[in-house]
Every structure is written in C-alpha cells, then in structure tokens.
Amino acid sequence: HGGEEEAEVAAQKEAEVATQDIFYVCKQALETVKEKISKSEEITQEIVSWLTVPDDLPNDELMVPVDMRGVGADFEDVEQMVEKLGMKGTAEAFIKAEKYLEEHKSETPEEERVKPMTAKEWRAVLQEEEDGFDEDGEEELLSAEEGEEEEGDLDEGGEEEGDGEEGEGGDAEEPAAKKARTEE
C-alpha cells in the first residue's frame, strides 16, 4: 500500500515539473458547453468542432487557453478524444482542462502565463506547428515537391529554344532518340 502512495507523490511531482500542455478553445463555445452539460443537454459534433476547430470562426473570436494536463490522459488530438470519450466526455475534458489551468496558474509567473488570443492568432500558431514537424506537414511537403516536379517538366519544355540550351538541350534530344528507336 505504501508503494502506491509513493508512486502517486512521484507522479504528482513529475506533473508539477511537466510543462503546461496548452490548447486553445473558443470561449463562447466553452460557455455553451458548460451550460449544456449543466442542463444535461446533448453535446453534438458541431459543438465539439465549434469548441476546438478555429477554421470557421471569425478572426476576432476569443479563444481561451486550457491546460490539457487537466484531462487526466494523453490524447494525440481532438478526434482521438472523441473516439475514446465521446462528445460529452470530450466537452467535459475541455472544461476540466480550463479548470486545471485556472487552479494552477499561480505556479506560473504572471508574465509567462498564457493569455486568451483571437481565432486568427490561434490559427497562425496551429499553422506554424503544422508547417513545422507533424505528419500533415510532411504530406504537404511531399505534395509541394510533386507540384514542383510537374512545373519543372513544363519549364524544360518551354525553355528549350531559348535560355535552357546549356544543360537542358541534351536532355531534350534524348527522348527524341528514344522515340526513334521505338518506331523501328
């Protein structure tokens, strides 16, 4: 029994040392979610999306920070939360995350505390993260490279006559020679 308590204390210390896991949600949607849950009303996919997806929000919509450590489990993204917790569970998780941030804000110096931001600012943050290092970013890079290759092919064809003679002239003759061989 004593080992469990020690493990809990260690886990708590670790949690205190752990950095905040900040996510931003739509303030208005969060208020709506709290109201609906207090009245035991249904939480729909639309509400969860309104809460968590800034894409369709007006630029000046207020987004408030929540600390996902308050959820009590690690999730890759909102979709995974919905899969595991359902709509209502996901909504409740964001309420817990907001409460957690509020309860633990004294642990962070005033100037380092996260502050609300607009939907436009949050989209910019998410875009930076996406451009940086996640799977979506990689896919975007791949499709961008493919696009460049296609453009490159067009450029080669378009530049043959003029300024492309240095290196591309030889390349352009090769396919013609191949064609001649296949005609025989």
Image: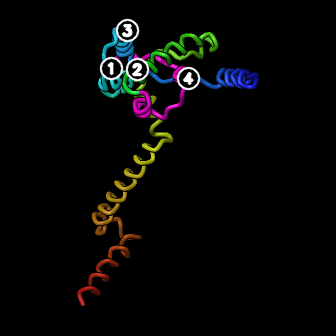
> Could you tell me which secondary element the residue under label 4 belongs to?
helix
Please report contact status of discs 1 and 3: CB closer than 8 Å, yes or no.
Answer: no
Q: In which quarter of the image is the N terminus?
A: top right
Direction from residue 158 to residue 6 in the image, left or right: right
**Residue found at x 28% / y 69%:** 161
Q: In which quarter of the image is residue 112?
A: top right
Q: Which mark is residue 2?
A: none
Q: How far apart are marks 3 and 4 (CA)?
A: 23 Å
Q: What residue occupies the far bottom of the structure in this picture?
A: 184
* Colour basis: rainbow
Query: Which amino acid does the dot numbered 4 rest on?
Result: Arg
**Residue found at x 29% / y 87%:** 181
**Residue found at x 30% / y 23%:** 44
Q: What residue occupies the far left of the structure in this picture?
A: 183
The mark that comes first in sequence, 1 or 3, is 3
Query: Which amino acid does the dot numbered 2 rest on?
Result: Ala
Pointer 1 residue: 43
> Could you tell me which secondary element the residue under label 1 belongs to?
loop
Pointer 3 residue: 38
Please report contact status of discs 1 and 2: CB closer than 8 Å, yes or no.
Answer: yes
**Residue found at x 45% / y 39%:** 131
Camera-side residue: 74 or 117? 74
Q: How far apart are marks 1 and 2 (CA)?
A: 7 Å
